[in-house]
Amino acid sequence: MSAYRTINPTTGETLEEHPVIDDAAVEEILARSADEYARYRTLPLEQRTATLRRAAELFRERMPELAEILTVEMGKPTTQARGEVALVASIFEYYADNAARFLAEEELDIVGGGEARVRTEPIGALLGIMPWNYPYYQVARFAAPNLALGNTIVLKHARNCPRAALALERVLHDAGVPADAYINAFIDSGQVAGIIADDRIRGVSLTGSEAAGAAVGEVAGRHMKKYVLELGGSDPFIVLDDADIEAAVAAAVVGRFANGGQACTASKRFIVVDAVYDEFTRKFIEAVSKISVGDPTDPDTFLGPLSSTSASAELDEIVRDAVDKGATLYVGPQARPSAAFYPPTVLTEVTPEMRAYEEELFGPAAVVYRVASPQAAVQLANSSPFGLSSSIFTRDAALADTIAEQLEAGMVWINSTSKSAPDLPFGGVKRSGVGRELARFGIDEFANKKLVRVLEPLR
């Protein structure tokens, strides 16, 4: 069983290592989490939300050190790392402010005498399986609503961000979340199926790859466990002939290259109608050529390294496959202090036989397509097996609304790239996953919607 390691992708240096826990330790953690659930769910809601509010305060107070961990551990540029910490604080604060409203009993308008109401209650201990690209944010989407609801959490983080995993756990415990209500566990992947199958675990949430989601969903379904899967995306960015091209280009650079392009909701396929294709592509490539690449600790750096040398190599394989089969390649600044760096890249003339046509490019590589019409743009956008987020750039409100209705995606942004906020639901369709996070929808996923029906008056 391999260890959890912090490897600085900028330098390649291994900074710390944590062994995976054995089966006896897993058993102890499951027992602790299940036992704590029986107590934690009975705490007054005001007490649970007070700890979330304090967690938000601590995230803000500790922002410099928490952001530095992201920069060192997975190469996130300093400014973007601070932005992630700020977003996490807002998520915990949001559920502290709104949980009482979301969890209030709902009176039903029924036929017949008596009354009926629905209670929203917790279901038990949950397993969270989280990725490395947003080490705090991905956890916050899952943890904040469920801690407010009264569920307890066992969290398996990615192997390459143990420092962030421990820092997040420390914030929650310092905020007053009971130690056994949120447990970080350095679990081996081979132990996951047994944990999901265990009767003490009542649900599982995974943010990760399509393959990982399929494996987790299969085990959870076999054991009748509720699951939420937030998986990959190949998000279309549609530019129509009346779009503000300057604004579209500026958004395209951020939407594709922020966080090193390592985001499921990053804009990945730029679908441009013929009338403005040449102008958009020329200006987009010019903007890409000006991206600041380098040391992620430099506040002026926009694009740092990818999370690992293997991530850079995997992306390069897809890009080289496209070029070998006839795609045109444009490469931006190539500062490479280590092998984990990958230059900002734009591909055109990509065709279906190339891997880049259908696979998710998880890194700083964009694909630009030329289409004849808005209808052709929708057809190409929907040809992907993924359906997470999408963007439409146009000045025509009616046309934007029509296209938004036709897109097979969980989220549609008009004249903007995808941005996360606590009060906006997050999730996709098709192979991008199952379920929703954030907003009021996030607190309902692992909840018992209990009906209480009263036929006769009660004294």
Image (spheres, rainbow, N blue to C red):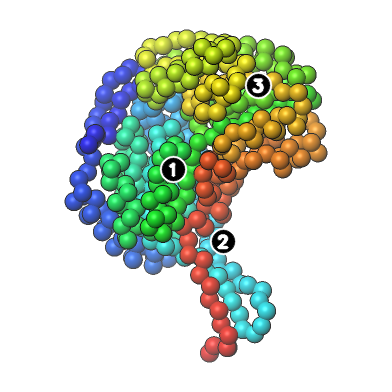
Q: What x and y, as percent, mark residue 325?
A: 54, 14
User: In whole angstroms, how far apart are the C-alphas of marks 2 and 1?
Assistant: 32 Å
Judge whether residue 300 can be spotted in this image: no
- The kind of residue on which mark 2 rests is Arg
Work out whether residue 96 or residue 435 is closer to the camera in this orientation and state it: 435
**Image quarter for residue 10?**
top left
In this rendering, which labeled residue sits more in front, label 2 or label 1?
1
Q: Is residue 430 above or below residue 9?
A: below
Write the residue at 46% across / 31% down.
82
Q: Is residue 238 above or below residue 91?
A: above
* Crowd band around label 2 with a 10 angstrom C-alpha radius: few (<14), some (14–19), many (20+): few
Q: Is residue 159 left or right of residue 116?
A: left
Write the residue at 55% across / 70% down.
118
- The kind of residue on which mark 3 rests is Tyr
Which numbered disc flags the more N-terminal residue, 1 or 3?
1
Label 3 sits on a secondary structure element that is strand
Give the residue pinned by disc 2: 101
- The kind of residue on which mark 1 rests is Gly
Q: What x and y, as percent, mark residue 33?
A: 30, 57
**Image quarter for residue 112?**
bottom right
**What's the mark number on residue 369?**
3
User: In whole angstroms, how far apart are the C-alphas of marks 3 and 2?
Assistant: 45 Å
Give the residue pinned by disc 1: 213
Is there a contact, CB below 8 Å, between mark 2 and mark 1? no
